[in-house]
Image (cartoon, rainbow, N blue to C red):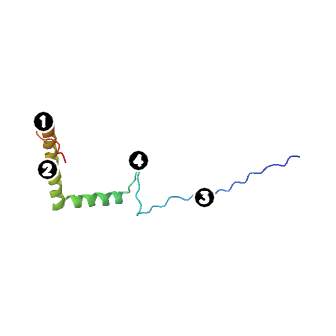
């Protein structure tokens, strides 16, 4: 009689990744994150509070002004009025 070979497998538990706030993480563009109502409200109210501050209003004006200047500069480059600086 031939001796039967027995296969023994050990199921080693795989460790689930643990979040470490000191590390950087990435995700795909279509990743889904689900917030509870209280969490959503907290984030929404925080953003509204920050955006209603005078500093945020000034920053948004600066950003809008920069957009206007960049558009003017792009047009001037396209017309040849402004050329790339040589070092």
Relative placement, left or right, of 28 versus 46 is right
Q: Which residue is mark 2?
A: 65
Q: In terms of image quadrants, where is residue 70?
A: top left
Neighbourhood count class around disc 2 (C-alpha, 10 Å): few under 14, some 14–19, many 20 upward: few
Q: Position of residue 43 (x, y in %)?
A: 31, 59
Q: Cα distance, mark 1 to mark 4?
A: 40 Å
Q: Is residue 13 above or below residue 86?
A: below
Q: Which mark is residue 66?
A: none
Q: Cα distance, mark 2 to mark 4?
A: 33 Å
Q: Which residue is mark 1?
A: 79
Please say if the residues under marks 3 and 2 sit with CB atoms less than 8 Å apart. Answer: no
Please say if the residues under marks 1 and 3 sit with CB atoms less than 8 Å apart. Answer: no
Q: Cα distance, mark 1 to mark 3?
A: 66 Å
Q: Which residue is mark 4?
A: 28
Mark 1 or 2, which is nearer the eye? Answer: 1
Q: Position of residue 33 (x, y in %)?
A: 40, 52
């Amino acid at each position: 009689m031939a001796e039967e070979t027995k296969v023994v497998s050990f199921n080693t538990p795989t460790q689930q990744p643990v979040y470490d706030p000191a590390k950087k993480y990435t995700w795909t563009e279509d990743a889904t994150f689900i917030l509870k109502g209280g969490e959503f409200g907290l984030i929404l109210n925080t953003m509204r509070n920050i955006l209603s501050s005078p500093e945020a209003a000034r920053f948004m004006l600066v950003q809008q002004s920069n957009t206007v200047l960049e558009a003017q500069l792009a047009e001037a480059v396209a017309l040849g009025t402004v050329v790339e600086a040589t070092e």
